[in-house]
Image: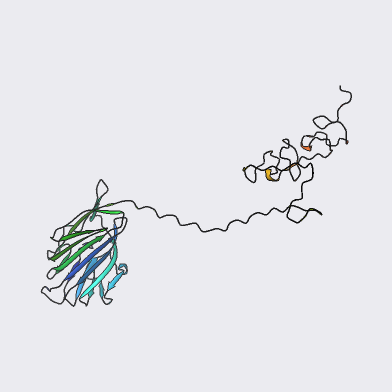
Amino acid sequence: MRHILLTLLLLSCLQALAGVQSETVFFLQPDGRHYLLERSIHSDSPTHRFHVNKNVQLEDIRHISPARFEWDEQSDDQVNSLQFEAGGFTLIYPGSFAEDELKQDAQGDYHYRSWDGTRNHQGLYGYWYSPGQFDQFTYTWIVPDNIELLRYRSNQRGTWTRRPNAVSFYAEQVNNLTFEISYRVSPTSPPPPPDPEPTAAPAAATRVAASSPGDGAAGKPPPLQPGTPVRRTNNGRGRNADSDRDGTPDPDDLCPDTPAGSKVDQVGCPLDSDHDGIPDGVDRCLATAEETPVDTHGCELDPARP
């Protein structure tokens, strides 16, 4: 017996009572298979018994009204039941459609059937009420935006009403109701990623030049002396650009065109230990006497050679 084979037995009398109102609302979830179900019955009877599938446990039920009831899971092998000493009740609980209730065709559309074709020992089936029948019966599906309702029908005469994201059936003086509903499920979009946490802007780097007496205020580079090469810019290539590959970034290089392989000082100018005009990096004779004529390798010229 399935969850929709909902039986309501009036224990207080053996004859039909007027004013039996029933409402069933399926809140279908985006996957098309799970739902939240609301069931309510109101009548003139002071006592009601309501049956649910065996897989529905008391702790699964999200809402029970009235709060006074009896829960029975021992006396029946197929269903659990709640008994209310009241003229009506409302339940809300989650569930999912069984394989024999919900089929999917080759196009991917879903087809739901509320009744599996079996009857109980009284010959009752589907949504039924005993003794008597439902004086007013409402059956509603509410679906999310990614689900499109295609077709719906009932075995009993009644009025179908279509609304945005919902369809409802209403009938009077009915019993043993079954329903078939077809719908299409579209994939849901993943939620957008959360906004990144704001991060503090990095503190601007402050370049403080070494100063010496007479250089001026601390933090300012000393003025250039006559004959000092003018520092060139990096032309937008970045703070770490190094055009002559001497290890000194262009913005800090006072000699931006040093020959390849030259050893340079802290401002990017070639070192020349013996002051012979040949940078140390290419000087093969680093200890020539001052004012000694040298060749292109920094070595003393041989006066015997023409």
Question: Which of 15/70 is in front?
Answer: 15
Q: Is any part of residue 147 visible from this angle?
A: yes
Q: Position of residue 24 (x, y in %)?
A: 22, 65
Look at the image and name its color scheme: rainbow
Q: Is residue 110 above or below residue 67?
A: above
Q: Is residue 73 visible?
A: no
Above or below, 72 against 221 in this view is: below
Examine the image and state in which quarter residue 2 appears: bottom left
133, 241: nearer the viewer: 241
Say left or right for 63 vs 158.
right
The part of the image, by quadrant, that contains residue 152 is bottom left
The percent coordinates of residue 156 (x first, y second) are: 13, 60
Q: Please identify the residue farthest to the front as the structure is shown.
A: 226
Q: Closest to the observer: 81 or 270? A: 270
Residue 111 versus residue 291 in the image, above or below: below
Q: Position of residue 233 (x, y in %)?
A: 67, 43
Q: In what quadrant of the picture does the N terminus appear?
A: bottom left
- In the rendered structure, the answer to whether residue 275 lies left or right of residue 203 reads right
The number of callouts visible is 0
* Residue at the spot 16% in from the left edge and 68% down from the top edge: 136
Question: Where's the C terminus, which quadrant?
Answer: top right
